[in-house]
Image: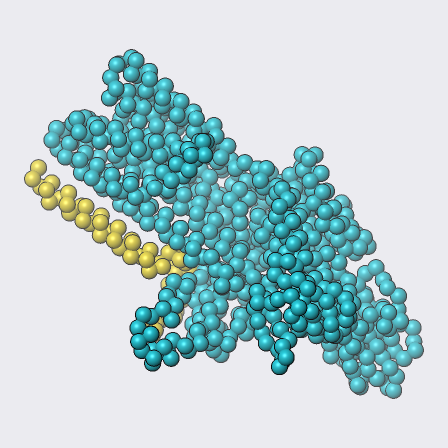
Chain colours: A cyan, B yellow
Amino acid sequence: MTASIRPPVSACPACAAAPAAQALAEVPKDAHIVLSLPTIHCAACMATVERALKGAPGVHSARVNLTMKRVSIEADADVTAQDVIPVVEAAGYEAHELDSTALSATQTDRAGRDLLMRLAVAGFASMNVMLLSIAVWSGAEGATRDLFHWISALIVLPAVAFSAQPFFRNAWTALRARHLNMDVPISLAILLAVGTSLWETSLSGEHAYFDAAIALTFFLLTGRYLDHRTRSVARSAAEELAALEVPRAWRVTGTGEEQVSVAELRVGDLIRVRPGGRMPVDGEIVEGTSELDRSLLTGETLPVLAEPGRTVSAGEVNLTGPLTVRATAVGRDTSLHRMADLVAIAESGRSRYTALADRAAKLYAPGVHILAALSFVGWYLYAGDLRVALNIAAAVLIITCPCALGLAVPAVTTAASGRLFRKGLLIKDATALERLAQVDTVVFDKTGTLTAGTPVLTNLDALSPEESRVALALAMGSSHPLSRALVEAAQAAGIRPETVEAIREVPGYGAEGRWQGQVVRLGRASWVGGQDLAQTAAWLRIAEDAPRALTFTDRLRDGAEVAVAALRDAGLRVILMSGDTAPAVEAMATRLGITQWLAEALPADKASRIAQMSAEGAHVLMVGDGLNDTAALRAAHASISPASALDAARVASDIVLLGSSLAPIPDALRTARKARKRITENFTIASWYNVIAVPLAVAGLCSPLIAALAMSISSITVSLNALRVR
Amino acid sequence: MNILTYLIPISLVLGGLGLVFFVFTIRSNQYDDPEGDARRILSGEYDDRPKQD
């Protein structure tokens, strides 16, 4: 991250005066590439990746950050992520590009650093004040006690003014909006403790709560910082995962082609999309024929034919031939973005959920104020002394102040998210774990979620040896996914290609060649002469023989079987919902042992089914990756999407799977349940401390020593309990 | 009790030094990758001489 903090090269004031320096400054800026490495986990991994990258041409330096599972690379200006990803993959690690221009890490980091600084000041002050307080508690008298109190005040006043600012600010915002949050009693307790202690000290009183005020700030800031850290690590990584976004496109100009950023494209531009590339815009094909994979948008696995005159949508993948597209909508106007925006407006499952901490605060905040006010009034009427009454009210506020409550949730979520992050799961939303713990129904999308999106040949043995050799020869020249699956299967079976001459690929249709003087074809049903099947198929015809069908099925994603089996064993209802055809969905459901499935589901169908189930009282976890799942992801109680998912789907979901395996999902549910249990336990512990200490405080028996002990012990117990999640 | 006039300033100065060092470590990005730094010490690289910048 160091590079993003460095001032830009051109920002030197002397440049204007020194032409030589300016010439130097115009040297093209180095490329700064950030990759996400979901599978990295050890010292040897870091060394391997760094060594591999440093050996790559044009790379100046590479540094792995194991905490965030990333590597930042400084390289020559012409080096792109596409050049370095294969290097990392060759070293044996999965890598995805992160959009370094969108890196909000510096910004979130600044907030974290700010909190850490306040935490450090509070820690320093509380240690020193505690030192002085111990002297007072062990019997310092008269002038010495007053001196120690005054020194404490001198340390605490500026420290609190600086460190407790986040609480004061939040409390002020809440009060202005005319409601109570946890920060209101916190701020009141800190201010009242400092205020009464100052008054006491000026009257040479016996009790001063300076140590309590600053220790309170320290413990609560610890909770805040843990909370911030957990969330910022996850949030920044999830947001910047640009694995499938198309940051660059090739624009056709009068003189040739130029590479531009997608943001620069305008309506009417001609854009060249190469095979394997994703459509950056909505548009109309003006040149070329090919096939399009629309699975990310609709869930269909069958590729569609693309020819001049057809319209295309952003997000579709071009499979075979180069296409030239005239843009009709760009950027936020593409159907992809419009659909994503529509989804964003829809009510989300998570907005209906109130976090446990907020629920506790709603009960707690008014209770604390009433209790403190009552004891103040009670003691004033009974003793008739404002000083005594105020002191006791302050003691009540300090004792009840939600120190342990403030740590109860963040300590557990930090421990749990840390554990899940090591398993390759990013928790994006603060309440995701709490909601995940309630899940009783899991809905899976098929294409791209349960399947890896790469086809596998299923009926190689249905072909004669001769036919398979010819098919292999035809397939070897093509980069179409079906051809590659055929080549892979045939080579695994030890088949050698026949010599087929004059092979040419007809984009959008298939491949054709001459074998022993006869025309041989491999490709689409309509072109070869077969009939359309319900499942993905390619056809092979040798001369005038009857065409033979080669059928394909989608490869299961790693861990899909394990995950589904584990979820069913845990007693959860597992449902499969897909936009694909019924036979394909049924086959997948039987393969995984899923009894409930829904085929040919439109995006709205998925969302409404989930809404219906929620209305019946079920807590649904949706696992999906495509645009057609986005509405469902938001409607569900909790949601997970794989890293390969569409940007909009990742944004809509609470948790992102960083690796390619689905196996961590059951584990996530287990950890979430455990975490929720710990949170409730923590609330119970915190309440018990109050039940014991509050009567003491109200009765006026709570000395600063008891207050300090109660506060520290409850906070430490709660933190230790949280560690049991690991 | 005169000893306090030395001891209290000394304890404050020592604590303050700790705080200053902590601020320095924050400023120089030493908490960006705690896990990685903990593991890096195990690597055999730069054992014989420090890394050349």
Query: Viewed as shown, does residue A431 lie left or right of B7?
Result: right
A685 vs A279, nearest the viewer? A279
Residue A272 vs A612, above or below: the answer is below
Residue drawn at (34%, 42%), measured in percent from left and top? A165
Residue A330 in percent (x, y) is at 63, 62
Query: Viewed as shown, does residue A302 lie left or right of A159?
Result: right
Residue farthest toward the top in the current orientation of the protein: A382
A266 vs A472, nearest the viewer? A266
Residue farthest toward the left in the current orientation of the protein: B2
Q: Could you tell me which quadrant the C terminus of chain B lies in?
A: bottom left
Whether residue A576 is visible here, answered yes or no, is no
Residue A177 vs A516, above or below: the answer is above
Residue A251 falls in image quadrant: bottom right
Residue A450 vs A28, above or below: the answer is above
Residue A423 falls in image quadrant: bottom right
How many numbered marks appear? 0
Residue A598 in percent (x, y) is at 77, 48
Residue A433 in percent (x, y) is at 54, 43
Query: Viewed as shown, does residue A49 lie left or right of B41?
Result: right
Residue A624 in percent (x, y) is at 66, 52
Query: Viewed as shown, does residue A141 lie left or right of A11?
Result: left
Residue drawn at (15%, 31%), measured in percent from left and top? A146
Whether residue A366 is visible here, answered yes or no, is yes
Residue drawn at (55%, 59%), measured in percent from left and top? A241
Q: Could you tell me which quadrant the N terminus of chain B lies in?
A: top left
